[in-house]
Amino acid sequence: MTTEDVATPRYLRIKNYLLSGIEKGRWKEGDVVPTEQALAQKFGVSRMTVNRAVNELSAEKVLTRVQGSGTYVAKQKYQATLIAIKSIADEVRDRGHEHSCEVHLLEQCKAQEPLTHQFDVAPGHLLFHSTIVHFDNGVPIQSEDRWVNAALAPDYMAQDFSVKTPNEYLMAAAPLQGVRYSVEAMSAPSDIARMLEIPEGEPCLVLFRKTLSQDQVASVATMWYPGSRYQLAGEI
Amino acid sequence: MTTEDVATPRYLRIKNYLLSGIEKGRWKEGDVVPTEQALAQKFGVSRMTVNRAVNELSAEKVLTRVQGSGTYVAKQKYQATLIAIKSIADEVRDRGHEHSCEVHLLEQCKAQEPLTHQFDVAPGHLLFHSTIVHFDNGVPIQSEDRWVNAALAPDYMAQDFSVKTPNEYLMAAAPLQGVRYSVEAMSAPSDIARMLEIPEGEPCLVLFRKTLSQDQVASVATMWYPGSRYQLAGEI
DNA sequence: GAGTGGTCTAGACCACAAT
DNA sequence: TTGTGGTCTAGACCACTCC
């Protein structure tokens, strides 16, 4: 009956239609989106199919439905959750301070043993590698050593990280699917101590983070924070 | 047609049926749950209704569906989120190790300056105070210094913490509403070092946690973990 | 009362897994 | 080949909001 069936299911096409409409600003927070009726007509599907699409978006907190009234674009929520995503530059700026950074290393290389395993790619797969130190009002607060999957972020080497941090670039380049992280406390080895301008052996928070995108590992990063100058916090 | 319509929707009844079955252990991780057909018959509803129930549980990651095969109870996810809630005793036991603990201090006292502010109570409000060290196979992995709001956990002093950790008792006594936490890295002062059996000055993870219940502060805890023996991890 | 979402049905065809 | 889930329909009745 329909023109093409094998492709994406219709309820997904409707979800995508609504999502992209929201993304493009056609409907903004609090706006009413078309009724089930209207969407059913527009897409030539039954109301149940539209209902599924809209209900799922509602479960995902993209839309809010009010019986008898209509369906609205939900308020933004944003990542209260964690350690994991926020950009260090934003954090510094939120505090009203000035962010800057120094690129110590930027190179590309072929994946070898420990990294092929981390990224779950074949040996020889192209990776980018960077080491960057971030400053808050000129005081070093984070040293970031990062490996990036070139397949997902091909322009990584061309970035100006003083404008957009690696994290910010990656968020834009490859939509974030998930994050794994761990935190531990370690003594600063000499190279880290030098970069962070702290005595060797000073306790540091070490955050190890792996980000996933499109079912692949997008990046693997190890971040050192001087214990005396930084603290991770959150709320549930 | 049906006996009662106003009550809970049928798809919800089916969800609850499956959820309670999983909770009671009728179906365990990896088990197959009844097919859509079977559930539709059992509840006397159409397959679409069952489909909705099961799909929603699947979206909530309680079930896993495999086309052509069946519907299974998903692997436990638990606490992907955080640092914040899990019982240290469970963590140790999950690892297959033996948990034990030593109570170094257990007292009650009246709230004074810094604590009245932390708890947002009047001076003189009754608080309990405990210091406990937790062991994994006899190796100290956490020192926990905790203040507890007596109004929310009146039996705190009577607990046997080797059976139920403070955290576990509090979770049971006062339903958790929210958590605030922060993590930092610090050098172990002498008293902490002694309790954790590590050299003074060794880097430690310090987790500060405040739990809320019934719109009040239920407890405030400071936990020290030897950096060499512990790591916080999570996933989103 | 008109319009919205909330729920439900009794079929149907398909893709996929197990056999 | 059989049984499972994945999707879809063209209706239906209800509860609710808003005019």
Image (cartoon, coloured by chain):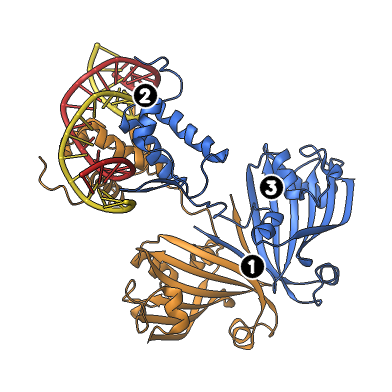
Chain colours: A orange, B blue, C yellow, D red
Specify which label sits upstream in the sequence, 2 or 3: 2
Labels 1 and 3 touching (C-beta < 8 A): no
Name the foreground residue: A129 vs A74: A129
- Residue A179 vs C13, above or below: the answer is below
The residue that label 2 is drawn on is B44
Report the mark closest to the observer, 2 or 1. Answer: 2
Q: Quadrant of the N terminus of chain B?
A: top left
Give, as a three-letter code, the residue at label 3: Thr
Q: Secondary structure at mark 2?
A: loop
The residue that label 1 is drawn on is B231
Report the mark closest to the observer, 1 or 3. Answer: 1
Give, as a three-letter code, the residue at label 1: Gln
> Does residue A161 appear anywhere in the picture?
no
- Residue A111 vs B174, above or below: the answer is below
> Does residue B35 appear anywhere in the picture?
yes
> Numbered disc 2: what chain?
B
Residue A53 at x, y = what percent? Answer: 29, 40
Specify which label sits upstream in the sequence, 2 or 1: 2
The residue that label 3 is drawn on is B211
Which residue is at 51% across, 49% downward? B29
Residue A128 at x, y = what percent? Answer: 39, 81
Give, as a three-letter code, the residue at label 2: Gly
Q: Secondary structure at mark 1?
A: loop
Report the mark closest to the observer, 2 or 3. Answer: 2
What is the distance, in whole Å, between disc 1 and disc 3 at their CAs? 21 Å
Q: Is the same chain shared between marks 2 and 1?
A: yes
What is the distance, in whole Å, between disc 2 and disc 1 at their CAs? 51 Å
